[in-house]
Image (tube, helix red, strand yellow):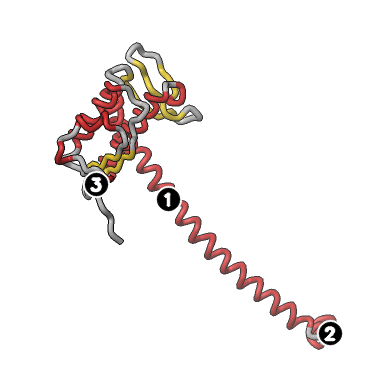
Amino acid sequence: IHIQQLEEAGTFEERSFQFYAKKSELDEQAKEWMILSLAKNMLNKVVNSYKNEKFPEILRNAEKFVQAITNGEYVRLYWKEDEAGLMLQRKDGVVFEAKEVSRGTQEGIYVALRLSLAGHVFSDHAMPIIIDDGFVNFDRSRVETVIKILKSIQNKQQVIFFTCHDYLLPYFKDEQIEQLSDIKLTL
């Protein structure tokens, strides 16, 4: 009798409609969750692959640049899997977090990582490396070393270097220098 009363009052139909509407909504949410879950799983695989396979090679190459930029003061660069992150080992064996070294050394590490990453990522399809006054906190020795590094990779990748510092111009040939103030732009 109770079911008959529900059916006659329309309550059963309303409840049935609400049930199927909620079921349909749940089905859509389940599909969306599945898509996001698969995407997350795929992204995690790519990140882990990059971290475990490619990142060590990038760090090894960056380590060579850091050794050159610091004139052999720092001999090892590695990633520590905790809150410390990027670590440097000085030639006397003392280890530092990257944030503990001088600003010039930090910027040298950053340049080394960027150059190593660019060399790795764009090894098949060379893309230009664009640097905008990236060495303003370097001393003369570090500037000379970085420019040597840039010259050593210029056959593999185009390097576009912007600067407003005239003291850097002698490091380049006249045909490599373009004064932007001399360029007239027409719109």
Compared across the picture, whether 46 is left or right of 183 comes to right
Q: Position of residue 142 (x, y in %)?
A: 29, 24
Residue depicted at x 38% and y 22%: 88
> Which one is earlier in the sequence, the residue at label 2 or at label 3?
2
Q: Amino acid at mark 2?
A: Gln
Q: Which label is found at residue 43?
A: 1
Q: Position of residue 170 (x, y in %)?
A: 20, 30
Is 142 or 31 nearer to us in this picture?
A: 142
Disc 2/disc 3 C-alpha distance (Å): 90 Å
Residue corresponding to mark 2:
5
> Which one is earlier in the sequence, the residue at label 2 or at label 1?
2
Q: Position of residue 149 (x, y in %)?
A: 22, 31
Residue corresponding to mark 3:
182
> Which one is earlier in the sequence, the residue at label 3 or at label 1?
1
Q: Secondary structure at mark 1?
A: helix
Please tell me whether residue 94 is drawn above or below residue 158 in the rendered image.
above
Q: Secondary structure at mark 2?
A: helix
